[in-house]
Image (cartoon, rainbow, N blue to C red):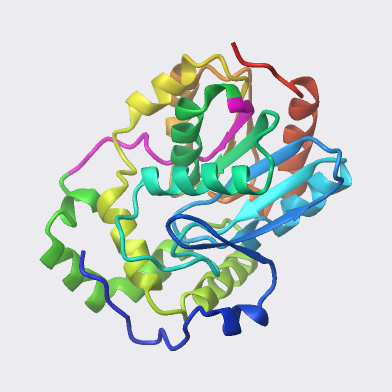
Amino acid sequence: MKYFIAVGENRRLTPDTRHALRGSFIELSDGVTHYELTGPGDGEVVVMAGGLTIPLFYWDGLVTELNARGLRTLTFSGYGRGYSDRIRACYNETLFARQLTELTHRLGLATRPLHLVGTSMGALVGMTYATQHRTSVSTLTVVGPAGLAKPQLTSPHRILRSDLLAGLVARRRGRRILQEHLGHNVHDPQLGAQLAEMVLDAQRFEGSLHAVFDTLQHLPVSGRDDLFQRTGTLGIPTLLLWGDQDEVTPLLQFDTARALLKPQQYHVIPECGHMAPYERPQDVADQIAPFVAAHGERLGS
């Protein structure tokens, strides 16, 4: 899809604008990445990969909970999200997995296996990373993963195969589609409003809407059973979490995920929508912390 700047994208990410923003920044091969590394220096490292729209702020509640439990956390905004660069390249899982690989290496975190958490689209990125770097992953936590819906003629990556059509839809209806998507993510309306404000604030930067729709065009979020199945054969201890009120990746996909991933542990969080780490950070931390403790310093074969 041809790069475009949407109406309302009235800010640019530059060294000067970033100076006033929270977090840290690092130049990687594809662009500048926005990240935060917090928690005890000697703690097991938990790395979090986010979904289609979310900046690293999404993880704040879970970070607080995990740091309090003695874990070190790395959060980052995928390219096109938060304060990471809006790049003029193909937004696919190869790009996001490469970003994760380069970031952990540049920060010196690749010397021991990591604990990887992926939610929604980020679960696909996490699984891609795990298949590429099996011995670098101690545990994998998958939360409300995308990818298990059956491909339909109306699937986003099918509708948007044409660059011309993709650009037309993104320019004319992109903002409305994004807002409608955000409205289905969170079970609690108040938290949903806060999430929308967080995401839309980061969408003020040039190239943000292009990044979302280019991702929809090039990163299939349905028909990914093969990726789940490959991940399930890796022998990586896996934790599967799901909100029982998830409207984006419905709970009816839970049994399929279990059959393909073969997780060591799984848990359904009651009264919770699609974004469990954001909605129920304490409950998610209560699952992740003991799971990490049980599988720390795993050595791959």
The C terminus - image quarter: top right
Q: Residue at x 66, y 54 (%)?
A: 279
- Whole-percent x, y for residue 130 in the image: 51, 29
The answer to which image quadrant residue 298 occupies is top right
In magenta, the rendered stretch is: 136-152
Q: Nearer the viewer, residue 193 or 88?
A: 88
- Whole-percent x, y for residue 247 in the image: 45, 49
- Whole-percent x, y for residue 195 in the image: 58, 67
Report if residue 142 lies within the magenta region: yes
Report if residue 260 lies within the magenta region: no
Q: Residue at x 49, y 49 (%)?
A: 99
Q: Nearer the viewer, residue 150 or 127?
A: 127
Q: Residue at x 75, y 29 (%)?
A: 292
The answer to which image quadrant residue 172 occupies is bottom left
The N terminus - image quarter: bottom left
Whether residue 145 is visible: no
Residue 71, compared with residue 232, is above or below; it is: below
Q: Nearer the viewer, residue 88 or 204?
A: 88
Residue 43, compared with residue 279, is above or below; it is: above
